[in-house]
Amino acid sequence: MDEITNPLRIELPREANLNDIIAERMREAPDAVLAEVPRGRGWAPISVRQFDAQVVEVAKGLVAKGVQPGDSVGIMSRTRYEWTLLDFAAWAAGAVPVPIYETSSAEQVQWILTDAAVTVLVVESAENAATVAEVRSHAPACREVLVIDASTGPGAIEALTTAGASVPDDEIARRRALADLDDLATIIYTSGTTGRPKGAELTHRNFLSLTTNTIPDVPDVFAAAGTRTLLFLPLAHVFARFIEVLAVHSGTVLGHSPDIKTLVEDLGQFRPTYILAVPRVFEKVYNAAEQTAAAGGKLRIFHWAASTAIAWSRASDTLRGPSAWLRAQHALAGALVFGKLRAKLGGQAAYAVSGGGPLGERLGHFYRGMGLTILEGYGLTESTAPTCVNRPERTKIGTVGAQLPGCSVRVAEDGEILLKGHHIFRGYHNNPQATAEAFDGEWFRTGDLGSLDEDGFLRITGRKKEIIVTAGGKNVAPATLEDRIRAHALVSQCVVVGDNRPFIGALVTIDQEGLPGWLTMHGKPELTVEQAMTDPDVLSALDQAVTRANAAVSKAESIRKFTVLPGDFTVENGYLTPSLKVKRALVLKDFAPDVERIYAPAADRKSLHTV
């Protein structure tokens, strides 16, 4: 099978737009809870009626600030309630909200402000405002910058509410009806692993039609009574943005957690029924649980429970199902281990949606076995996040699921995944050349490689541009190796190298957060990252991690030598995108001497490890 189309379930009238979501909620249940916000040591509810009133007030403020229909309004903030409020207020004013990562550099901010012609920019903090101030003179369209957490004077929300007091309600009602399905809803700038970010133009159809059709297609997660989700991924990224719109649309109670340092506490208090995360989050939760068990002298119990969870999940995919003995073991593991793990996620989460990279079959089976079914999906900024996802009743762990309604996929002869449907963006902002290059006729070129099985489930095998061709002509997909190595508790990042080289090598960084727990688990004293780089036990563990990864590929594709780098790749130092993808080209450029040492004559190979 090399092409599949899932028919659209629900057609929308052309005049529909994202403002209809709130209007529909107001008609059906105005006093239902739409969101909850932190207050004291708890969470305070905000009803649909209250949210709508706040949206109108802030929209009036944007109108008073001179924002015209079709103008761009920038939002530069962490994930918080005000982000969602501003998003819907911009749509109510007929404007186009443009996200900017709060970690963006001044140069990146300048590019987005000028390319999108942002008129009013709302930032979270004085620090964000200072970054904007560096380039404000080069962004002439930007008339005003407002700060949510202002150190002096009113904050952005209060300032907009005050400014818009004299704007009539009828003006917002008029503007809410202006856009149709094919009008621009937002411009999301791809964080990009290379070059200047491109602005993907997403329409009201992209979001509204996709959420309208996804909710009834995955009802156990998004349409069940009492659904709740806590957003902690950046709302500047399309993945969280889609779930934001879907949550408001579906009636899911929405919460926001802006600080990863308080995430565990927030999860415990908010108690979501489903969670949105990237694979790295699930890897870290598993590794932290393993290290906690070791510190408490319960490592053997944890490993037994983990093995039981995986065996139970795998057996659940067979016709016979788990044996009576395995069911009994699973119940015992649930009482001893799984319940505590689920409690860390709030105790109510039955499902999680994972995207942004491959999760790995072992972790997928582990989490399902411990009571959290991770529905792995696939999509890009250009496809408004999801194009396919595993369903609770139709899951194949190791795949990214089947297409959502209205979405089509084709696998080209060279293995590239092509997409089309109501969820595909209309083009790159101010960049017709890039837009033309992104399409093969009506099909969008994803740049990803994959395959479809006989049931229409998609499997991702790598990135087309990242395929390594060794000197011997062997094609190697680095993701297969990198994902497995990165799952180890000691490893933060891994970059596989070997293009036009005699064999495959790798650059590895140590996880500074995971190192102390691993040392404790193995009865070793505290070590700095620099000390760990030369510690025999640490290096032996890394050797084993690479050896396990090599078992998944042929000998010609396996890593023969690797080197451990002294630092790490982070968003702050520019080597990771805000969605935690490695900027491979930049790493290979800046760490070229380290790569060269891998392939240098034996006498020059310092700090290298042969597998």
Image (cartoon, grey):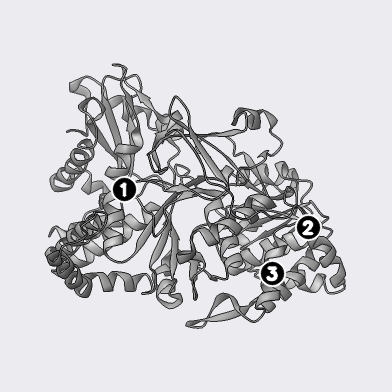
Front-most of 578 and 368?
A: 368
Mark 3 burial class by Cα count in 10 Å: few <14, some 14-19, many 20+: few
Q: Are marks 3 and 1 in contact (CB under 8 Å)?
A: no
- Reading the image, the residue beneath label 1 is 360
Q: Nearer the viewer, mark 3 or mark 1?
A: 3
Give me the C-alpha separation between circle 2 and circle 1. 42 Å
Location of residue 284 by image quarter:
bottom left
Cα–Cα span, label 2 and label 3: 18 Å
How far apart, in angstroms, are the residues tagged by discs 3 and 1? 39 Å
Q: Amino acid at mark 1?
A: Gly
Is disc 1 surrounded by few (<14), some (14 to 19) or many (20+) residues within 10 Å? some
Regarding residue 259, the answer to whether it shows in the image is: no
Residue 43 sits above or below residue 327 on the image: below
Q: Dot 2: what SS?
A: loop
Q: How many marks?
A: 3
Quarter of the C terminus within the rendering:
top left
Read off the residue under disc 3.
Answer: 24
Q: Position of residue 409 (x, y in %)?
A: 51, 38
- Left or right position of 294 against 46: left
**For numbered disc 1, what is the local secondary structure?**
loop
Q: Amino acid at mark 2?
A: Gly
* Mark 2 vs 1, N-terminal side: 2
In the displayed structure, 458 sits above or below 37; it is above
Among the two numbered marks 2 and 3 on one chain, the one whose residue lies closer to the N terminus: 3
Which residue lies at the image location 79% right of the left edge and 48% below the top edge? 141
> To which residue does mark 2 refer?
94
The answer to whether one can see residue 543 in this image is yes
The quarter of the image holding the N terminus is: top left
